Image (cartoon, rainbow, N blue to C red):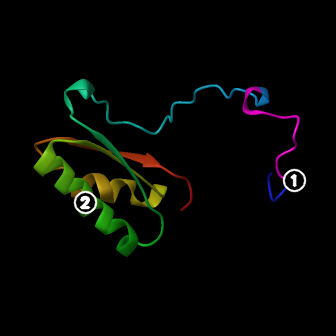
Amino acid sequence: MCPYPNVYPSPLTPHHWPLLPAQVPSDIEQPVEAAPSYPRHAFLMTRGTRGDVQPFVALARGLCSERGWLVTICTEARWKAWVLAQCADITAGAVRSLCSGGG
């Protein structure tokens, strides 16, 4: 029994929920031609100041250089250029930037 009966009406089940069309973000500008060759894909999401974003960039660099992973960093639009500049010298793996909106 759901403790919040008004949140989940009983006659509705997941198969009644509308199907949303697949949406591909338009701000992924770095095409990844050999995506299947990456052993893993990590999606990292952060928002805030540069001090909030920088540890995720460091983690992405490590996953790329040590493991050869594809890493997508999802953060505010104002950090896109900075994230990509910090990852420009990566030779193994790849880093993409995805905008989460905001300043």
Place of residue 17 in the rendered image (x, y in percent of width and height, measured from the top left): 76, 31
Rendered position, 80 above or below 48? above
Label 1 to label 2, Cα distance in Å? Answer: 42 Å
Q: Nearer the viewer, residue 93 or 80?
A: 93
Tell me the residue that label 2 is attached to: 59
Q: Residues within 10 Å of mark 1 (few under 14, many from 20)?
A: few
Can the viewer see residue 33 in this picture? no
Place of residue 9 in the rendered image (x, y in percent of width and height, measured from the top left): 87, 43
Place of residue 49 in the rendered image (x, y in percent of width and height, measured from the top left): 43, 73
Query: Of discs 1 and 2, which sits in the foreground?
Result: 1
Can the viewer see residue 42 in this picture? yes
**Which numbered disc, 1 or 2, marks the residue that appears first in the sequence?**
1
Label 2: element kind: helix
Place of residue 31 in the rendered image (x, y in percent of width and height, measured from the top left): 31, 30
- Return the mark for residue 5: 1
Q: Nearer the viewer, residue 64 or 7?
A: 7
Amino acid type for the residue under numbered disc 2: Leu
Magenta span of residues: 6-15
